[in-house]
Image (cartoon, coloured by chain):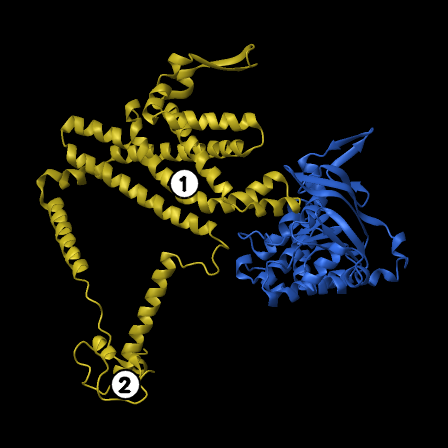
Amino acid sequence: MGLPTGSTAAPPGASSPGRGRPSAAPVPDDPGSLKVVPARHYARWTATVAVAVLAAQFVHGMATNPVWEWAVFGDYVLSETIVRAVWVTLQLTAYATVLGFLLGTVLAFMRLSRSPLLQTVAWTYIWIFRSIPMIVQLVFWFNLSALYKELGVGVPFGPVFWSVDSNSLIGTIGAAVIGLTLHQAAYAAEIVRGGVVSVDPGQLEAAAALGIPRLRQIRRIVLPQAMRAILPTAGNEIIGLLKGTSVVYVMSIGELFYQVQVIYGRNGRVIPLLLVATAWYVVLTSLLSVAQYYVERHYARGADRTPPPTPLQRACRLIRTLRAAAAQREQPVVPLKPLGGSR
Amino acid sequence: MSAVTSEPTDPVTRQVMVDVHGVHKSFGPLEVLRGVDLRVRTGEVTVILGPSGSGKSTLLRTINHLEKVGQGWIAIDGELVGYRRSGGKLYELKEKDVLKQRTGIGFVFQNFNLFPHLTVLENLVEAPVSALRRPRREAEATARRLLARVGLEDKADAYPRQLSGGQQQRVAIARALALEPKVLLFDEPTSALDPELVGEVLDVIKDLARTGTTMIVVTHEIGFAREVADTVVFMDSGVVVEQGPPAAVLDAPRHERTRAFLSKVL
């Protein structure tokens, strides 16, 4: 635009994108027709090479260092004992997640309620259970029968109609689930509360102005919107819980980490068996992450004008584009082939 | 007004739909309403004007009990809002009963407040189904009819964020109408809209006015007030300064404060 005539002398501004050979062609008025030379990132390239070498070394070591004992890993990773232990881990996670988040949601709404007593009770609960290390709490529950020998139903401070020995009622798995749940509920309460307060107050006002019943306001209007803020943190918590179940090995429950320890205590193959546990935790965490992606997507309804495609949709689209491109490439080379190859 | 043929021509003899009596309201030390009296008759459109901070919106919010009154009382169609009178005492209503009362009072917000995670149709169906226990199919049929009325029948399955501001506000009006309220309250319904979208929303409100819907509209649109209002109310500092037919209040205001306000906005 600044060059009214197509002058043959290259202006200083035009020489830098051309990198030394600007006068090969007459300088055009339109910079869009010039060749673009990408910027050089020497530091980035050096760092990339260095990290690539380190990564290759690491993988090479994993594959060749005999201490990993990949054969032993292969023997145990799908063995019946381990798979059963994984199942126990999954059960502990599932129970503690469901019960923990149910109790947590109740606590969250207690903290948000207008009753000072409910607020205080919820606050105290969260304060105490966030303060006690999970392992300490688990051992407490394990020794519940020392604390309360019998559990019963009756009038508060009055007669008891029905009672049962606490150990036979709860059992070790029960004690572990209770411990994990109570611990989880304290964190879940804060996560749910955070989600609820993140919802625009105008939403509750609109629901109230429409006369929608109170419980329905929470279930249908507030919680689905709160889920957007709850899910990322809740995903973290559930993954933390999955790995946290390994702590219940102190109660001799046959979950993954306990079982792995039992086996290497017997045969001394510590490293490959720790690898077995690691592999399973990684697989389970990955599955949870995938589930989290789809649940988050579900609750994002209406948040985006055009929701982004799922990885599956993206893959399908890619295949379609590649196919179309391939078909296009074939056509001009052998234009008559579709006719001949139709049978 | 269409109701003229069927009802007595003298508006004074029409039934009072909204009766606001000596209402006071404070937020902490700040007294926002300082004794407001207002009467709206069935089928009438009342437009409330006034500078910001004059208590217009608060007054509107006390009418459907989103704010409790400090003193005074409000009745809709002869029924006290938020209280029950029994044996010389006023009993505060439980939340459940307040919610039931609100189904008779439509409210349209400045910021629309549509439920963003529900489709337009679900937004309209939610309250009739959950609050009035209407069958879903019947509620959906009503909802589609109302959407057609505000010119958005093709947007039933869209989500609110996929609509323009004007369209969202028209959906919000349809949502309020879905409960077949006795009175519709509008809290600055066009203040959050781009200028070119204001018209489409005002057209919907004008159409409602023609069909005899009882309405109270808080707005800054003087032209709209002149065209549609039966009564214009001018508020300032928590009191009604003057009220009357638009010709009287807008063209020949008797109070200095009204004159000052109108000279600024006209």
Dot 2: within a 10 Å radius of its alpha carbon, few (fewer than 14), some, or many (20 or more) residues?
Answer: some
Q: Which residue is mark 2?
A: A28
Residue underneath mark 1: A234
Q: Position of residue A97 (x, y in %)?
A: 41, 35
Which residue: 56% across, 59% down? B157
Q: Which chain is blue?
A: B
Q: Tell me the residue at 65%/49% (across/down).
A: B53
Residue A186 in the image, given as x and y percentages of width and height: 43, 30
Quarter residue B166 falls in: bottom right
Element class at badge 2 = loop
Earlier-in-chain disc, 1 versus 2: 2
Q: Residue at x 38, y 60 (%)?
A: A313
- Above or below, A44 against A3 in this view is above
Name the kind of residue labelled 1 in the image. Ala
Chain of the residue under the numbered disc 2 shown in the image: A
Chain letter, yellow in picture: A
Q: Where is residue A275 shown, x and y percent of the image?
A: 20, 38
User: Which mark, by number, is residue A8?
Assistant: none
Residue sitting farthest toward the top: A159
Give the side of residue B40 with respect to residue A331, left or right: right
Residue A39: x percent and y percent? Answer: 22, 67
Q: Amino acid at mark 2?
A: Pro
Q: Secondary structure at mark 1?
A: helix
